[in-house]
Image: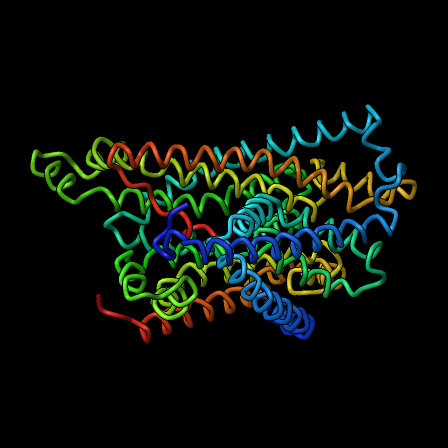
């Protein structure tokens, strides 16, 4: 089934794609985390306008297919912002989409901190910002790891949507190598899938280590 | 709104909140206005860009595309339930020769990006199956793997006393699963299954990589037309349609979950099984 000779020949191209996938993943993960944290803070804040904005953002971006977001930003974007590299636009689309899920992951983590903790913080006179930053968030950090890990794994897989929009990342090679190796569909698929499995394994491995390190007994 | 994170505001805090609210409203409104202004500046709101949506033939094509999208999602989720039930049962089996391969299949299809899977299926069997069934097959394999995990979580969540009591009155393994565990698991899994329908519907759009004749393809024919060249507007219209459908489904899932909670049952936590 798998032709290892052909696999060796296509490996440089697959590695090029892997590198671009990693870059898409890294940039989007950082931007989405910052934006998602901001949104999560808005969603628990005492200001109604900010809560409303946070909720609307999550509902809009979580229910829009990523492909539609790519159509608006990657295909339509250049009409508005001028000629821009597809990779940059794809990063923007992936970040905006993933931020909604980061926000929800953080929120579900924060909810696992027992209410007594926040009540105790308030009863000794802490305000909203102090309660959140000194008492709740440090405890939420560990509970947040599993949901955030699955968000980043999903992001890693979602970078593949960029292949349909002319970004030559890992999945793109499935088609671009078709001309050179038309008979080797299974080989190409296996070679490409291997690298996605590596990314997924690394992310869940890191999550497990962090979870063990930060274990708290309650 | 009351929250454990902050007190009921006093007069000073109320004044401060009001100030922050005014500033943040201005900032957010400014941000949205700025985006709209840039869109306007770059001729996104001209008549030509919106003209296709006044054309009855175009609208009919879009509706037909949407129907195909919905059909693909519906067929895929039904097949995925069968696939999920089979592999969840396999993974829960006491026989290693059954549970290990099932686990491998489930974990594999959860780890592979769906768009790559669809493209692979198309290049492999697209000639005989056609584009529609390649898309459905890909959706079935991925969502089936996720559903298998949901089913497994649902069955594992049934209290152990239930199966122990069933074994004690002499039921066999198959009977315990069929008569005792599965019926109790179904209600706990319902919200998760509905949420998975949202994922399946969103993922139907991945057919773009093999040009299935769904609503995305119809949309692409419109915005690639040099007379319109309106990817942003078409994309926004698509987003509105998907948001309406998916938001209603999500609300349904929340409603079902609340009803379960009011009966003292707990729903299966979906968030960490399904990726987005």
Q: Specify the farthest residue to the right.
A: B227
A123 left or right of B107 in image: left
- Return the residue nearer the eye: B254 or B273: B254
- Return the residue nearer the eye: B261 or A178: B261
Q: How far across and how far down the image is residue B120, in percent?
A: 62, 52
Q: How far across and how far down the image is residue A211, in percent?
A: 34, 70
Q: Specify the farthest residue to the left.
A: B168
> Which image quadrant: the N terminus of chain A?
bottom right
Residue A6 in sight in this render = no
Residue sitting at x 35%, y 38%: B189
Residue B225 position (above or below residue A178): above
Residue sitting at x 26%, y 37%: B265
The color scheme shown is: rainbow
Q: How far across and how far down the image is residue B218, in percent?
A: 76, 36
Residue sitting at x 50%, y 52%: A47
Residue B237 in sight in this render = yes
Residue A25 position (above or below residue A44): below
């Amino acid at each position: 089934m798998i032709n290892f000779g052909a696999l060796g020949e296509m490996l440089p191209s697959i590695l090029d794609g892997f590198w671009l996938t990693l870059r898409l993943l890294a940039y989007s993960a950082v931007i989405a985390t910052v934006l998602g944290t901001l949104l999560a803070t808005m969603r628990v804040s005492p200001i109604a306008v900010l809560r409303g904005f946070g909720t609307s953002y999550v509902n809009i971006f979580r229910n829009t297919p990523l492909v539609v977001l790519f159509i608006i930003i990657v295909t339509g974007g250049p009409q508005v912002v001028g000629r821009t590299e597809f990779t940059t636009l794809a990063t923007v689309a992936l970040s905006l989409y993933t931020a909604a899920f980061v926000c929800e992951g953080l929120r579900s983590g924060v909810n696992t901190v027992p209410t007594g903790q926040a009540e105790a913080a308030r009863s000794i006179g802490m305000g909203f910002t102090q309660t959140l930053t000194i008492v709740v968030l440090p405890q939420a950090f560990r509970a947040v790891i599993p949901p955030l890990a699955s968000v980043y794994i999903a992001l890693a897989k979602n970078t593949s949507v960029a292949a349909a929009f002319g970004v030559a990342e890992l999945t793109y090679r499935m088609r671009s190598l078709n001309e050179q190796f038309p008979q080797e569909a299974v080989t190409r698929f296996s070679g490409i899938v291997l690298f996605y499995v590596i990314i997924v394994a690394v992310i869940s491995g890191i999550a497990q280590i962090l979870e063990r390190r930060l274990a708290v007994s309650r | 709104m009351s929250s454990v994170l902050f007190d009921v505001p006093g007069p000073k805090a109320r004044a401060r909140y009001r100030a922050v609210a005014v500033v943040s409203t201005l900032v957010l409104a400014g941000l949205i206005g700025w985006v709209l202004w840039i869109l306007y500046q770059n001729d996104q709101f001209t008549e030509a860009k919106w003209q296709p949506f006044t054309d009855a033939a175009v609208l009919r094509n879009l509706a037909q595309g949407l129907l195909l999208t919905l059909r693909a999602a519906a067929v895929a989720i039904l097949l995925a339930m069968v696939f999920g039930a089979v592999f969840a049962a396999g993974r829960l089996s006491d026989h290693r020769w059954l549970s290990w391969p099932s686990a491998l299949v489930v974990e594999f299809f959860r780890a592979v990006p769906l768009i790559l899977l669809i493209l692979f299926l198309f290049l492999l069997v697209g000639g005989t199956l056609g584009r529609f069934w390649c898309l459905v097959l890909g959706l079935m394999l991925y969502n089936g793997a996720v559903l298998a995990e949901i089913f497994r979580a649902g069955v594992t969540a049934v209290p152990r006393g239930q199966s122990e009591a069933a074994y004690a009155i002499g039921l066999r393994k198959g009977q315990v699963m069929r008569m005792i565990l599965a019926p109790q698991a179904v209600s706990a899994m319902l919200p998760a299954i509905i949420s998975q329908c949202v994922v399946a519907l969103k993922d139907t759009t991945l057919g773009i990589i093999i040009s299935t004749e769904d609503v995305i393809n119809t949309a692409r024919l419109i915005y690639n037309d040099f007379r319109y060249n309106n990817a942003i507007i078409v994309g926004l219209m698509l987003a509105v349609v998907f948001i309406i459908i998916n938001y209603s489904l999500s609300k349904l899932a929340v409603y079902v979950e609340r009803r379960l909670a009011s009966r003292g049952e707990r729903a299966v936590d979906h968030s960490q099984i399904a990726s987005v």
